[in-house]
Image (spheres, rainbow, N blue to C red):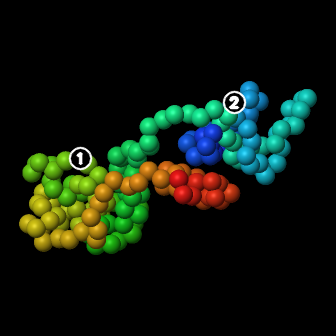
């Protein structure tokens, strides 16, 4: 019952992921309808329900445009778990402030990159120029597209892909 279900807004925009239990509650109370099942059925004493994979809300929910939260995990994901100095692809990475904090560098998307410990150590508290180091690409805030937001679920729920593309 904790298997994730994709929740679409009334206009089909993917907005959330909820548990199977919550999704069934929304459908039974008439707040959402079933868009996709294909996961078999859930049997109770008196009834059988299709197990939802995607539901759609009956009423449009208004909300601000989503943004990606600035966290270490999200910086590493944006940089595809690749050191932005040497290109090493590894799960053991640190976060480097391009302009060091003691030199006024800020904790922002365009001043943070994934760096392997060796590169981070080599750069130390210096700027790129001082350390004679170059970035593979200039960092920026990742677009909060649905495909980016829900990427971690798509491997296990490939049937969601057509519903999150182009949002
Ligand atoms: Zn490196």
Q: Which mark is residue 107?
A: 1
Quadrant of the image occupied by residue 160: bottom right
- Residue 52 vs residue 112: left or right? right
- Residue 125 vs residue 85: left or right? left
Residue 72 appears at what percent x and percent y? Answer: 35, 50
Q: Label 1 to label 2, Cα distance in Å? A: 40 Å
Residue 152 visible in this rendered orientation of the protein: no
Residue designated by label 2: 31
> Quick one: label 2, few (<14), some, or many (20+) residues within 10 Å?
some
Question: Is residue 4 placed above or below 87 in the rendered structure?
Answer: above
Q: Are marks 1 and 2 in contact (CB under 8 Å)?
A: no
Question: Is residue 105 placed above or below 63 in the rendered structure?
Answer: below
Residue 130 visible in this rendered orientation of the protein: yes
Residue 100 appears at what percent x and percent y? Answer: 15, 53
> In the orientation shown, which residue stands out farthest toward the right?
46
Which quadrant holds the N terminus? Answer: top right
Quadrant of the image occupied by residue 33: top right
């Amino acid at each position: 019952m904790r298997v994730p279900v994709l929740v679409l807004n009334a206009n089909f925009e993917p907005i959330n992921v909820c548990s199977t239990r919550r999704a069934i509650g929304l459908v039974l109370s008439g707040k959402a309808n079933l868009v996709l099942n294909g996961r078999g059925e859930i049997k109770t004493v008196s009834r059988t329900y299709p197990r939802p994979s995607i539901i759609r809300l009956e009423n449009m929910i208004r909300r601000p445009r989503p943004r990606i939260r600035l966290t270490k995990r999200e910086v590493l994901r944006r940089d595809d778990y690749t050191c932005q100095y040497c290109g090493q692809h590894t799960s053991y990475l640190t976060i480097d402030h391009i302009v060091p904090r003691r030199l006024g560098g800020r904790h922002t998307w365009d001043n943070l990159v994934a760096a392997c410990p060796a590169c981070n150590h080599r750069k130390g508290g210096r700027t790129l120029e001082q350390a004679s180091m170059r970035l593979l690409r200039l960092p920026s805030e990742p677009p909060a597209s649905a495909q980016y937001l829900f990427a971690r679920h798509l491997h296990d729920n490939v049937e969601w892909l057509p519903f999150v593309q182009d949002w």
